[in-house]
Image (cartoon, grey):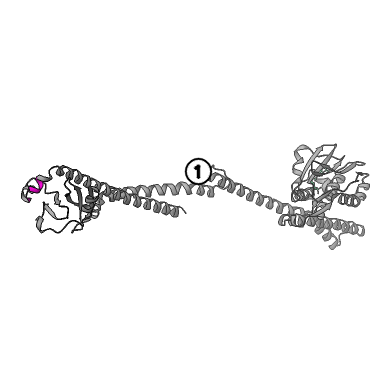
Amino acid sequence: MRKRLQINFFVIAALAILAVLSLTTIVFYNLFQNEVIENLQTCAHVLESNVDQLSRMDRETFQSREMNQVRVTLIDKEGGVLFDSNAEADKMENHKERPEVQEAFRNEEGKSIRKSSTLDKASFYYAVKVSDGRVLRVAKESESFWSFLIRVSPMIGGIAVILVLVSVILSRYLASSMVHPIEILAKNMDGSEPVTSYKELAPFIHTIQKQHEDIMKNSRLRQEFTANVSHELKTPLTSISGYSELIENGMATDSDTIRFAGEIHKNANRLLVLINDILQLSQMDSRDFSADFELVDLTEIVRECIDMLQLNAKKQGIRIEWKADVSFFVKGSPKMLEELVYNLIDNAIRYNKENGQVTVSLGNKENHIILSVKDTGIGICPENQERIFERFYRVDKSRSKETGGTGLGLAIVKHIVVCHNASIQVNSEEGKGTELIVSFEQANE
Ligand code: ADP
């Protein structure tokens, strides 16, 4: 990239140098031409006042006056040559058709530049109409464009070489200053070293670093998740393997066998619940469900979940309070919403105190449907309130395991909340109870 940029910059600079030098040469040659013509004009006007004297003068006298650089010709009204400083007038052809002479007859003055017989010379003519109608023409041979070019080419070549060298250095510097921040960024994606660059690159650097940060974070979370999954699966599997080995070796009495089989059953169920939660999370990670969303009656879902959990609540003497007179609709997946409500009420029961209470309510506030699940349970200390949504994070490990928790319930809840463009909030006081509030956007029917 650096080499390519450098070449591109250099090509642009070289083209610019070529164009500027060519134009400068043309401009200078034009100035040079103008100067020669102006000199001839001055000369013609000086001679104009002495034209009578001139017509009487012979060629030798004229040349001896050191005017031989300039050729003077006097032409009568018909174009016939009356006098010429460089040739015998009577042997010269009619000059009426010469452009500068024609122009002088028409406009009092005329000029013309013509190629000479030799390539390196050009003939410059300036003609003035004298008061009696004759035309006085002065001419001079001077450098042609080509000989001018040859004369100035060493100087132009020198300038070109200097400019090319400067542009090589500049294009190298420019290419470097463009590529350098990108190279630094590539070596330093985590942003540990500040990348100094031009301001247009700042948003790009920021986005790249942010993306890199996200990728790293995701990869770290995935690694942690995999490690946690293995650990969580290992515990029940070790129990299953241990108890079954005891039975296999005949080391268990009849009553032990029944107890061990019960343990195996319990751990196998635990494995099933765990695998189910893990599968659910990975499914949600890999798919966008929003395409399948439909209008869901949240009131109905809450009623069904309470019915399913009523038995568990009764076992612990917990009362579920729930008032539902209106149907509240949200746009979403019925299965996921059921999972969300079930997990929240299940937690409110599992982390409650004996004879406690769970209050579930649905309401409408500022274009949002608010679901609240409140318990009079053990509560969560402030520093853990954010972390409970992390995968496998448990505040009360033993109670979680005892009650069949996987540490994934609220992670699934959080995922569902994000999928539904909703938000979740925890209000909790240790020892007093917890309230989880989910706020859904109101469905536009
Ligand atoms: P688990 O399967 O362990 O219940 P969750 O993800 O559902 O996992 O919850 C994570 C942790 O948050 C739980 O282990 C528990 O410590 C805490 N928690 C969740 N809900 C409540 C609640 N209503 N009251 C007190 N603590 C709770």
- Quadrant in which ligand 1 is drawn: top right
- How many circles with numbers are drawn on the protein? 1
Camera-side residue: 317 or 155?
Answer: 155
Q: Would you identify the image quadrant in which residue 322 lies?
A: top right
Q: Is residue 61 left or right of residue 208?
A: left
Q: Nearer the viewer, residue 126 or 190?
A: 126
Disc 1 residue lies near ligand 1 with CB under 8 A: no
Q: Position of residue 204 (x, y in %)?
A: 56, 47
Alpha-carbon neighbours of circle 1 within 10 Å: few (<14), some, or many (≥20)?
few
Position of residue 253 in the picture relative to residue 163 (left or right)? right
Query: What residue is shown at x 94% (from left), y 47% (from top)?
Result: 314
Q: Quadrant of residue 44?
A: top left
Residue 333 point in image, percent of width and height: 79, 54
Q: Nearer the viewer, residue 323 or 331?
A: 331
Q: Report the magenta stretch's main SS.
A: helix
| 55 is within the stretch colored magenta | yes
Residue 338 shows in this picture? no
| Region rendered in magenta | 53-58
Residue 362's spot in the image, x, y percent?
86, 44
Is residue 412 shown to the viewer in this render?
A: yes
Query: Where residue 19 appears, x then y in whole percent?
Result: 35, 51
Q: Answer with left or right where residue 216 lies relative to residue 107.
A: right
The residue that label 1 is drawn on is: 198
Magenta stretch containing residue 27, yes or no? no
The answer to whether residue 245 is above or below residue 47 is below
Secondary structure at numbered mark 1? loop
The type of residue carrying mark 1 is Tyr
374 on left or right of 133: right
